[in-house]
Amino acid sequence: MFEKTRLKLTGWYLLIIMLISFSFSLVIYKVLTNEVERFSRMQQLRTERRLRSDFFSPPPLTADPDLVNETKNRILIMLIEINSIILIVSGGLGYFLAGRTLKPIKEMVDEQNQFITDASHELRTPLTSLRSEIEVNLRDKNLKLNEAKALLNSNLEEVISLQSLTNNLMDLTQYHKKNGGLAFEKLSLLTVINESVKKILPLSDKKKIFIKKNVEDYSITGNKLSLVQLFIILLDNAVKYSRNNSEIIINTHKTNGTIVVDVNDKGIGIDKKDLLFIFDRFYRAGSSRSKETAAGYGLGLSIAKEIINLHHGKITVKSSLGKGTVFSVSLFS
Ligand code: ADP
């Protein structure tokens, strides 16, 4: 598909260049042939005048009409040669430039196709299990009410999980599309952290995980909803990947106008080989790949990264397998 488009674009480049080149050649041809004809006419007049005034002196050389025609032909041939060279050179150059122009578009389309493939794959797996579960139970003529209720409960869980996947997908594409279009305001960092922690408390309480806040109330510039979502993602992961009765610590500090928030956990940690990829869409590190270990689709950190990019900030991670992880978020006041 792209080769076809590249050839089409090359054709358009060539058409434009050759139209300009032909127009210039036409003007050059007209000007030069007019000059040759004018020169020939002047030589003719000079000869006639000379002949009338001085009968005995030798006449100056007059322009030969054949020579004039030959000169015109030579100009024409030269212009055709120049245009042929322009056609060949601009053909090659146009093809190269068309490739360069289409490269970022091709990369974008490839990325989108990959995204659609990954998203469809993630949606297909739970939908297939949901369908087969319903079908098997519908075929069971002796299905009891309590069994049917258990089935509905399990189905509901799947639906809630699917809903969270589609919400994540929507968030990811929305943030990706925004491209700097978020409304920013002056915010209190403490308020943002408090709101995020409040949303996570039901989960951390369930696992008896204590969230400790050493947070200075710095003023930051950003979009409140998205920043709250960012810290919810980090805290949710910290809870998800920590054992019961552990601790999560949120620290803040300021260096050279940059406000840094660290989210520390004493959880399972991330293997070195996974660290490079955890911000990629749908990536789940080996230890968390199975949905039984921790629910998720590998989209949280990609959303976090999009939010950070919109804030022109930075997100980094340090981790030690089996000991814990620290995510550091840099924001501006
Ligand atoms: P998920 O829905 O799988 O949590 P994320 O994009 O939020 O998706 O995270 C990607 C992967 O990074 C996770 O699957 C997990 O392997 C790893 N990860 C993220 N945060 C932590 C953490 N605090 N501790 C250990 N592993 C983590």
Image (tube, rainbow, N blue to C red):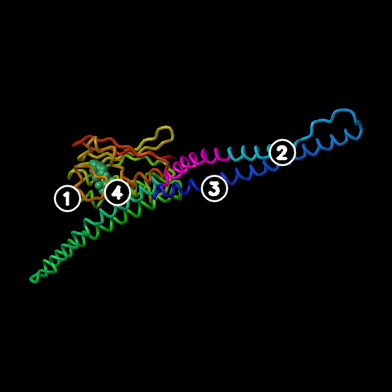
Marker disc for residue 66: 2
Identify which residue is drawn at 71% across, 40% down.
33
Identify which residue is drawn at 51% across, 39% down.
88
Is any part of residue 235 visible from this angle?
no
Q: Nearer the viewer, mark 1 or mark 2?
A: 2
Tell me where residue 242 sits by quadrant: top left
* Distance of label 1 from label 2 (alpha carbons): 95 Å
Secondary structure beneath disc 1?
loop
Circle 4/circle 3 CB separation < 8 Å: no
Identify residue for label 3.
15
Residue 102 in magenta? yes
Q: Nearer the viewer, mark 2 or mark 3?
A: 2
Secondary structure beneath disc 3?
helix
Highlighted magenta segment, given as a residue range: 82-105
Residue located farthest toward the front when viewing the structure as drawn: 56
Identify which residue is drawn at 18% across, 43% down.
243
Circle 2/circle 4 CB separation < 8 Å: no
Cβ at disc 1 under 8 Å from ligand 1: no
Q: Position of residue 94 (x, y in %)?
A: 49, 42
